[in-house]
Image: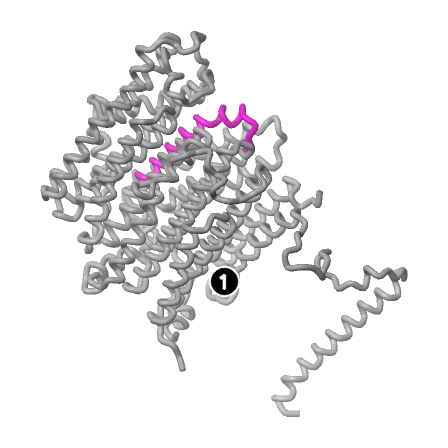
Amino acid sequence: MHAVLAAAQTLKAPDLDYFALAPEIVLTAVLVGILLLDVFVDETRKYLVTQVAGLGLLVSLVPVVALAANGADRSMLGGAYVVDNFALLVKALFLATGYVVLLMSSDYIGEGDYYEGEYSFLLLSSLLGMMVMGSSRDLITIFVALELLSIPAYLLAGWRKRDLRSNEACLKYYLLGVLASAVMLYGMSLIFGATGSTVLRTIGREVGGSVGEEPIVTLGIFFIVVGFAFKVSAVPFHFWAPDTYEGAPTPVTAFLSVASKAAGFVALLQLVYIGFFGREEVWGPLFWVLAALTMTVGNLVALRQTNVVRMLAYSSVAQAGYILVPFAVAGSNPAANATAQTAALVYLLIYAAMNLGAFAIVMAVARKTRSAEISSYGGLFTYAPGLTLLMSVFLFSLAGIPPLAGWFAKLYIFESALDAGTAAAVTLAVVAGLNAVIALFYYSAVAKEMWMRPVPDGDTTPIPVPPALAAALAFTAIVVVAVGVYPQAFARLGDLAQLTLR
Amino acid sequence: MTLDGGWYLTLAAVLFTIGAVGLLVRRNVLVMFMCVELMLNAVNLTFVTFARMLDDIGGQALVFFVLVVAAAEVVVGLGIIVSIFRRRGGTTADDLHLLKG
Amino acid sequence: MSAFLRGYLSVLVFGFAAVAMVGAMLGAGRLLRPSRPQPQKYIAYESGVDPVGTGWSQSQVRYYIFALLFVMFDVEAVFIFPWAIRLEALGIFGLVEMLIFIVILALGLVYAWRKGVLRWV
């Protein structure tokens, strides 16, 4: 006990780098602001809260850009909180995703009988957790960030309080979410016990050394990876995802399937590349199995869906499988590591744009048809050619057809597998290739419905798209097309944002 | 007689397993909820034991965060359960079958 | 008088002060209040709930929201204890940080108050 007491005696105020913390500080101030605004503004002017929240997200982007321009890596609290290019890139991703989701939801939430102010508040709280996750290089910080992003997300999933399906979505997400947290925490406790530290860099050193051979480390890594497998809805820990995605309000589904999943992957990247790097024989095969299962099961089940939201839910399960491929092949040689990391990051960025876009279209169409059945998309081209075109762009990008961004993302995944060059990696690349072909079937089924089938009820009045939703669509579409045409932009970002090992 | 850390770790592992099994086999949402708490407290016990064995304050600090976060989770979870209970007067996981994965 | 006993003198003074305080308050209450004895008034007070009954008795559902609020705010105190012990070493920095923490917590209470959660409907 003496060392503990001695440590407590010498405890001093930590040195904080306020510039490095600026994005989070701004976001916290915005959170406080919108909470007060929501509480003191009357019912008819609640839209102000959403507007201030959107503005706040853009303002928090300013320090992120300033930090990126400054370029120096900043580390504080003994390496527990690091602001480097990786952290800044994912923070920018989360803020952009949050802004697009807010654009998508402003009319949806305003029109329904929902609590408008609290919605923005919870969304921004969750985003704050994700921002912290980008910089977390310590088990405690990762855990707190994960819970900060998850707890508001549980509530958002149940936002339609009077809808039984939304209740059910919420409860399933909650129970499995806390189970995942508990499993992950147990893994963290074992890792802490074996290495004597919660800082990832120290853990990385220990795990790479003789401590890494102990079975307790293997068990710890296993538990942590399984915990995060729940969060990123990897098969066989995916069963909550389709139900939650279908029951939750559509903008929330978009948020969960993009931002929350990306946050899980960001945490995994940090854990694997900094903390557990020395034990690739433990996590390598684990990720291999997860990736292969996730891709295959996600795609095969998506084939049978008749509801667009459920289809997109299974498709996002399958997409998570592709992102797991670089994890499975990392660690075999230094060149492959660099490609694997870039591949995972680039895929996350591109996946965010195309998936958000697809969900925005689903919302636009549902404004008229009040349905998310694939059959209700029949003849969409005859009365909403613009939406049809955009939906086709997003679907074919998700399928990985050139020259759209999704193609480039998949190419990078294959490159990472082939760079690794081992038999296992090449097999996984083949599995991924087969899956890309399966995926084409169900994506093109929706496209066929839109372009070729007749309108089911003969109602061909055009769909009015509110300006905010149109802005979200325009933004995501531009990213998908521009990155497809000029992929070097994102590749460069991915290369710059490498996590430094050890 | 003082027990060495191994016993505490074993106890924590047993508690964690009981919680995990309970969560998977019980159908009452409130009981499932208690099982999660049991798992989290097993984790806390592990952390405290290791912190004591290693003379490192980090583990104890983490327990504080786990405690607070668990309380936040409980509040959110109970809120969800009460809002469902209002709509359907029963809280078994089997009642929730509108969405089939 | 030895220093040892002098140490206990303050305890003694505190003890007397405490007893006197209780006596003064009860006495003042007895002088001021009207006396209307009813049998219910002699039941042991337990937050307004009937203290005798089965273990499965139901309690008023309105308590649950207060219980939730209590759990939330109660547990946050766990961060204040270690801070209080090291207050001097942490100095102004610690004071400001803890103020920010408590203000953010208080905002939660403001929210609950404005939403009418604290009213007994």
Q: Which residues are magenta?
A: A89-117
**Amino acid at circle 1:** Trp
Magenta residue check for C72: no
Picture coordinates of residue A337, whole percent (x, y) = 17, 45
In the image, taking residue B15 as reference, residue A340 lies left or right, namely left
The one of A487 and A376 positioned closer to us in this rendering: A376
Question: Is any part of residue A196 visible from this angle?
Answer: yes
Q: Residue at x 19, y 41 (%)?
A: A340
Q: Under tag 1, what secondary structure?
A: helix
Tell me the quadrant of the picture where the C terminus of chain A can be found. bottom left
Instruction: Please report the residue visible at 38 percent of the width from the left and 16 percent of the height from the top.
Output: A377
Q: Residue at x 31, y 22 (%)?
A: A478
The local crowd at label 1, few if under 14, some if 14 to 19, many if 20 or more residues have their Cα within 10 Å, is some
The residue located at (48%, 59%) in the rendering is C94
Quarter location, residue A414 = top left
The residue beneath circle 1 is: C83
Question: Mark 1, chain letter?
Answer: C
Q: Position of residue A439 (x, y in %)?
A: 25, 27
**Residue A158 x/y as whole percent:** 49, 36
Q: In the image, is residue C52 above or below residue C111?
A: below
Of A288 and A96, the residue lying toward us: A288
Q: Is A242 situated above or below B71?
A: above
Residue B6 image-quadrant placement = bottom left
Q: Is residue B61 something one can see in this rendering?
A: no
Image vertical order of residue A497 relative to residue A182, above or below: above
Residue A52 horizontal side relative to residue A395, left or right: right
Quadrant (top left, top right, bottom left, bottom right) of the N terminus of chain A: bottom left
Relative to the observer, which residue lies in front, A195 or C35?
C35
Magenta-drawn stretch, dominant element (helix, strand or loop): helix
Residue at the bottom extreme?
Answer: C1
Q: Is A90 part of what is drawn in magenta?
A: yes
